Image: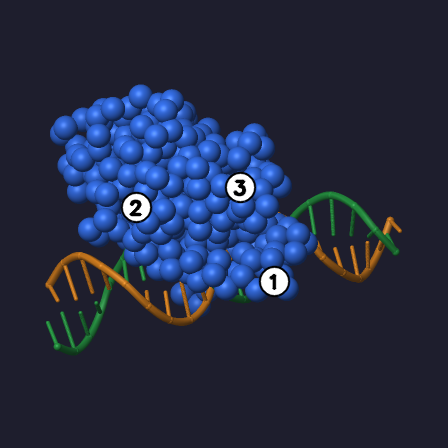
Chain colours: A blue, B orange, C green
Amino acid sequence: MGRFDKEGLKKGPWTPEEDQKLLSFIDKHGCGSWRALPAKAGLQRCGKSCRLRWINYLRPDIKRGKFSLQEERTIIQLHALLGNRWSAIAAYLPSRTDNEIKNYWNSRLKKRLTKMGIDPMTHKPNGEGSSKYVANLSHMAEWESARLEAEARLVRKSKIFFNNNNNNHNYNINPTTISQQLPYYQQLPCLDILKAWQMTSTKLPTINDISHAILRNNSKNKKLDSSIPSSTLNSSENIFANNAPTTTKVGDDHQNLHELSTINSCFEDDHLQTELPSFMQEFSGLFPEYTQNSTNGLQLDNIMGSCSGDFEDNKLLINWNNLPNYLVNSPIDCIN
DNA sequence: AATCCGGCCAACCGCTGTAGT
DNA sequence: TACTACAGCGGTTGGCCGGAT
């Protein structure tokens, strides 16, 4: 056991003693300045190795063990949007590391999709030309990638901030407690618009489901503490918080659609928009139980047809800017 | 029992981006 | 502006382990 590089630094698997040294050093001094850390901690490792060991293994908030079905789906869906941006994907699964997600993707999910006849890189069925699907995804990915990188950094900083301010000495802290203690803006925001799709129900989501979800989110965001700096919220949340209509009563399709269109009108200036039927069709492939009951989006068209009077040019405008948030479950669910 | 093989995953490597000087 | 140090990211490697032969 124990390879060494030319500078005499140890490589290879970490021993429990090394782990303990690293843990107790970070316990006392916090992490950061990785280059200087090994010498101070009495470790014959390079700083990079220490950092990796901490981030991928020793960090107290890491969830280990089997990936849940929900997590699997989230990874697949986000991968469809973002490609191999593992750190960005990991930002939406806060208790999983990018390395773990990458390994899981490469060793299992990729193969499973291939077996199902889906190209794991393009996320389209093999042999079927679906250029619109791919084009739309890549378009969305462009929009998302820049923002996600910034957001991933924010998440990391939030974690560091949290650790530093909750004396990072307690490694037995309950992850659920972490989630509950985090200020709202440090939690990953979550709209529920697609949450219903991800449930085991085989029922096709209706316009009412969607408007309900958006309005519920609207209601939730209105409870934001006014002290929260707006810059820490993503743009969609700001719009909801500042401009959304006050009514949150749900139950009447036309009333909700009217409010939804009002909400969406707030997006028009600086947000990418598209038509709902297209949006739902593009993603139907990512929701097996949904696809099962729909036939090439025909049902969606019917839904839209029945409600089209509430929309200019028969279009419901959707904000893409927060799409990955649509796709993942609540922060607490992610951590538990 | 021995060997082979493939899956899994921790760790490494090399590159890029960023902050500081 | 150029340079340096460092952190972070994604791709790859290598060792361990369990199942098959």
Question: In terms of sequence position, does the residue under pointer 1 or pointer 3 come before the other?
Answer: 1
Question: In terms of sequence position, does the residue under pointer 3 or pointer 2 come before the other?
Answer: 3
Which residue corresponds to the image point at 36% horizontal and 24% vertical from the top-left? A252
Question: In terms of sequence position, does the residue under pointer 1 or pointer 2 come before the other?
Answer: 1
Both on one chain, marks 3 and 2? yes
Q: Residues within 10 Å of mark 1 (few under 14, many from 20)?
A: few
- Chain name for mark 1: A
Q: Residues within 10 Å of mark 2 (few under 14, many from 20)?
A: few
> Which amino acid does the dot numbered 1 rest on?
Glu
Residue A52 lies, in percent from the top left, at 41, 51
Residue at the disc numbered 1: A128
Which residue corresponds to the image point at 21% horizontal and 39% vertical from the top-left? A239
Q: Horizontally, is A286 left or right of A59 in the view?
A: right
The picture quadrant where one finds residue A260 is: top left
User: What distance separates the C-alpha of mark 1 from that of mark 2?
Assistant: 33 Å
Q: Horizontally, is A12 left or right of A34 in the view?
A: right
Both on one chain, marks 1 and 2? yes
Q: Secondary structure at mark 3?
A: helix
Nearer the observer, A325 or C7? A325
Q: Nearer the viewer, mark 1 or mark 2?
A: 2
Residue at the disc numbered 2: A312
> Which amino acid does the dot numbered 2 rest on?
Glu
Q: Secondary structure at mark 1?
A: loop
Residue at the disc numbered 3: A299
Q: Horizontally, is A150 left or right of B15 in the view?
A: left
Q: Secondary structure at mark 2?
A: helix
Residue A118 lies, in percent from the top left, at 61, 56
Nearer the observer, A12 or A166? A166
Does the rendering let one see residue A152? no
Disc 1 to disc 3: CB gap under 8 Å: no
